[in-house]
Image (tube, helix red, strand yellow):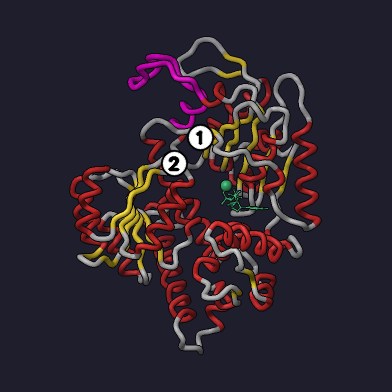
């Protein structure tokens, strides 16, 4: 749960966002002006600040400067109506962590808040998350043979249980294909469903923190170790430990992981005695692990061990008619959520969805539909209301507005990405830092613009 403050003079938007975030257990307050916002900021000291750029009594930039004078740690997301490169750079210089351009997808905004608070927890030493909700394979939507085969495979893998360490499961697939959903299904469809499901993102923290997190430590193991601390492996005993982004794990930790997979034995940091756990390891990555092995960044022996039980989640473009099917499902879900029960996709919109390549996969589709449901002017969503990139560029001859600003936005976002990549010498972590966004967000955006890391 995060303490969030939204400062936006579009009261309906702020209210909707607050309602939405509250549903995900966040504690949210809203303000409509700089003055009111600063007052609330002082009384609540929020973890996350969502800030509109244009406010009746000042700009978001002024707000950021005042806040940053006293608070280094709050995460700031600035929302603007137009995304120019200069503005983004200024905002980041002033101390914003993230910049979003309108229309904002509630889902994306929430994902960013979650990613930020995840980083924040890292520094406040509370770095793991037990599953919030029980998701099983019924939440993996889709009618294509590819997705049906996948769910059958998940069910088979989940139904195998035995004494001792179960073989690990490796989930591979492009960004946004649903790897996390699949990992949850592996757990909640298994006999271990009442045991803990614990997930940790291996890319989100430095190796030594990840190590302490996984193994725990004895009292006095190092200067900060004032108390004994149980690691995630022990916490997940009898259940499932989900190692997300395992391809980014550091090589020495990979060796330790391999040992655990083999016999379930490990040592807390600073301990003499070994411990035994029975944990199913589920690992996910959107890297090509074979390529990581060839580069010397991933241990071959660990890769061979992991890939025995592999679930490869297909990109959305390879799932026959699933894009339109999922779009309709999401449209219905969002319609209920936003009280627009009669909303549906028109035939042209469905055709555009079928034709699009969905580089961001299901996540992109979900965001597009959410945005369209929120902004649609009638009960039928038309193709142009989806604001798909291809349509944006094909409407450049039309001077009616939305298409134009969309493509200008796209261009400036692309320019920013290219600049950050050049500056960081194509180092993803560094580029993400320059832009003040998470690596996940950066990867997603690179893919969206078909840019190479
Ligand atoms: N088949 C599906 N049915 C319904 N929702 C889905 C499906 N696949 C993915 N989603 C939704 O799409 C979003 C992205 O999925 P998820 O986070 O599991 O992707 P991922 O593969 O882990 O991506 P990344 O590599 O970027 O971490 C989530 O909101 C998820 O609930
Ligand atoms: Mg994921």
* Foreground pick, 52 / 334: 334
Q: Is residue 13 visible?
A: yes
Eyeballing the image, is 336 above or below 212?
below
**Residue at image location 58% in from the left, 36% down from the top:** 243
Is 263 on the left or on the right of 14, as rendered? right
What secondary structure is found at the residue carrying circle 2?
Answer: helix
Q: Quadrant of residue 329?
A: bottom right
Residue 158 is situated, as x and y percent measured from the top left of the image, at 74, 34
Asked if the residue at tag 2 contacts the one at tag 1, i.e. Cβ–Cβ closer than 8 Å, the answer is yes
Magenta-colored stretch includes residue 89: no
Height in image: 230 above or below 139? above
- Looking at the picture, how far across and down is residue 309, in whole percent? 75, 38
Q: Disc number at residue 118? A: 2
Disc ID at residue 146: none
Residue 223 at what x, y percent from top left? Answer: 33, 20
Observer-nearest residue: 422 or 311? 311
Residue at the spot x=76%, y=26% of the render? 161
Q: Is residue 317 above or below residue 137?
A: below
Residue 394 % position (x, y): 56, 83
Query: What range is drawn magenta here?
Result: 208-231
The reply to whether residue 389 is in sight is: no
The answer to whether residue 304 is above or below residue 101 is above
Query: Quick one: 199 or 412, which is closer to the camera?
Result: 199
Which corner quadrant holds the N terminus?
top left
For the point 40% across and 36% down, the residue is 121
For mark 1, give the secondary structure. Answer: strand
In the image: residue 9, left or right of residue 438: left
Reading the image, the residue beneath label 1 is 129
Question: Mark 2, residues whose alpha carbon is within 10 Å: few (<14), some, or many (≥20)?
Answer: many
Q: Quadrant of residue 279?
A: top right
Please say whether residue 213 is one of the residues in the magenta stretch.
yes
């Amino acid at each position: 749960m995060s303490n969030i403050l939204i400062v936006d003079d579009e009261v309906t938007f702020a209210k909707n966002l607050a309602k939405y975030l509250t549903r995900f257990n966040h504690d949210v307050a809203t303000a409509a002006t700089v003055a009111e916002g600063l007052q609330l900021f002082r009384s609540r000291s929020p973890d996350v600040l969502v800030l509109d750029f244009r406010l009746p009594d000042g700009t978001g930039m002024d707000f950021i400067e005042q806040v940053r004078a006293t608070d280094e740690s709050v995460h700031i997301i600035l929302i603007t109506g137009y995304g120019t490169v200069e503005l983004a750079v200024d905002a980041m210089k002033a101390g914003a962590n993230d910049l979003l351009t309108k229309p904002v997808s509630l889902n994306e905004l929430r994902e960013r808040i979650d990613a930020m608070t995840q980083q924040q927890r890292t520094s406040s030493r509370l770095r793991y998350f037990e599953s919030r909700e029980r998701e099983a394979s019924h939440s993996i939507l889709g009618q294509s043979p590819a997705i049906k085969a996948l769910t059958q495979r998940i069910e088979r893998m989940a139904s195998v249980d035995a004494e001792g360490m179960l073989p690990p499961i490796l989930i591979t697939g492009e960004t946004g294909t649903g790897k996390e959903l699949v990992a949850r299904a592996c757990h909640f469809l298994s006999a271990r469903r009442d045991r803990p499901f614990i997930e940790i993102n291996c890319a989100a923290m430095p190796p030594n923190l990840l190590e302490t997190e996984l193994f725990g430590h004895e009292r006095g193991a190092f200067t900060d170790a004032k108390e004994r601390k149980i690691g995630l492996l022990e916490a997940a005993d009898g259940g499932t430990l989900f190692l997300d982004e395992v391809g980014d794990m550091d090589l020495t930790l990979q060796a330790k992981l391999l040992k655990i997979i083999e016999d379930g034995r490990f040592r807390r940091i600073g301990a003499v005695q070994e411990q035994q756990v029975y944990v199913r390891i589920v690992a996910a990555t959107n890297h090509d692990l074979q390529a990581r092995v060839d580069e010397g960044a991933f241990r071959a022996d660990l890769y061979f061990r992991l890939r025995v039980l592999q679930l490869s989640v297909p990109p959305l473009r390879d799932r026959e008619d699933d894009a339109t099917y999922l779009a309709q499902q999401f449209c219905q879900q969002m319609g209920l959520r936003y009280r627009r029960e009669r909303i549906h996709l028109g035939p042209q919109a469905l055709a555009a969805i079928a034709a699009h390549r969905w580089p961001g996969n299901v996540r992109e589709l979900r965001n597009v539909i959410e945005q369209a449901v929120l902004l649609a002017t009638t009960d039928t969503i038309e193709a142009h209301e989806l604001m798909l990139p291809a349509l944006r560029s094909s409407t450049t001859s039309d001077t009616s507005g939305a298409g134009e600003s969309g493509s200008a936005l796209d261009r400036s976002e692309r320019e920013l990405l290219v600049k950050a990549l050049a500056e960081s010498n194509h180092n993803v972590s560094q580029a993400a830092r320059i832009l003040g966004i998470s690596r996940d967000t950066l990867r997603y955006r690179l893919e969206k613009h078909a840019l190479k890391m």
